[in-house]
Image (spheres, rainbow, N blue to C red):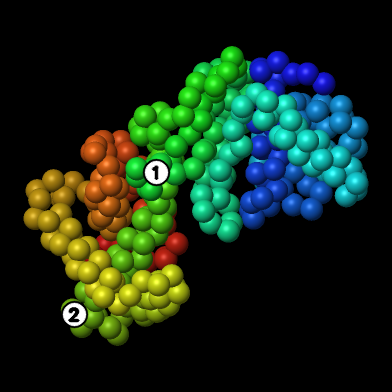
Amino acid sequence: MKFDFYNCLGLALIADYYQTSFQMTNGRGYDLNLLVPKCIGAQFANLFKEIGSTFNGFDCDEDPNYFWIEFTSDTEKSKVDEYFQDFNLTHRQNAMIALPNLYEGSREVNEKLCEWYLKVIEDYLRDDFKGRIAIPFGLDESNSNERIFMAYDENGMKGLFKGSTIFKKSKIRFVNYFTLIYYWGDVSILFLESLMSAKGETTTTQYSVVWESTKKIISNLKKFGTSEEELKKSISYFAKIRDSFINKKSSEAIPLNLVSATLVAMCVRDALESNSSEELDLDFFMEIVNDAKVYLEGFELDFKT
């Protein structure tokens, strides 16, 4: 069977959506089940029927915009697996459509990158190939914290681009974005514990919660090879950022419940800019603040210190 590039790109993206879903651990693809957005669900269903695979479909209770495709047996699912494997080795390769690099040197796929890529595929197929699609292609050799992408439109390959070139407003360009959010969020908890200890607040209910979080954080960071010296330096750096922030008149405009997230975001911004030749704009910084706030909320603390 021969495909023109338009159809080949569409099949490649459906293949990526299918295979990526089953590589993730969040339940989008498991056993014989695949979660598909309704807006493009017909494209998946029609293809599976054409392949000769039988399946059932039912609504997703958690999100009415999605539905589940359930293959009737392992054999029926294998038909789709084998079809995509053959397609990737022949037609896709001939059309020079890149396979996504979702591992980036790790044993497991990067879940955040997978989530982003699935959303990009959904939007691109829903909008009938409007604009360009960027397939994650790995890390930039000149900057290991920046991703590169192979871009296509319906007519063919547009070329290989750095994330900073095509995603100036998106955090997906940075490899360690969420790692930095988590790390500096953890450091903020360690700093809070040391601050409360210095103030003699170790008998409060708040401190008990902070201390339990501190023990877990230190244990986890040690597992990842973070030394005590590194932690001390990071806590010291966070303290300097906090002092600088407090001494600025503009800090008074920040709501108390956003102060900790803002401090974390300042540390993350500094780390990202240290490996880049550009400064991040205010909109991007506010996105970092929001992600830091979401992470810190998981500790269930009253961040008003």
Q: Residues within 10 Å of mark 2 (few under 14, many from 20)?
A: few
Seen at 86% across and 31% down, the residue is: 51
Q: In the image, is residue 149 above or below residue 9?
A: below
Assign a secondary structure to mark 2: helix
- The picture places residue 175, in percent across and down from the top left corner, at 42, 48
- In which quadrant of the rendered view does residue 247 lie? bottom left
* Element type at mark 1: loop
Q: Which residue is at the front of the view, 65 or 7?
A: 7
Observer-nearest of 54 and 290: 54
Residue at numbered disc 1 = 141
Q: In this orientation, which residue lies closer to the viewer: 171 or 285? A: 171
Horizontal side, residue 111 vs residue 233: left or right: right
Residue 198, which numbered label? 2
Measuring from the top left, give residue 229's x and y in whole percent.
Answer: 26, 75
Circle 1 residues within 10 Å: few <14, some 14–19, many ≥20: few
Determine whether, in the image, residue 109 is placed left or right of residue 7.
left
What amino acid does circle 2 point to? Ala
4 in relation to 279, above or below: above
On the question of residue 209 being in view, the answer is no
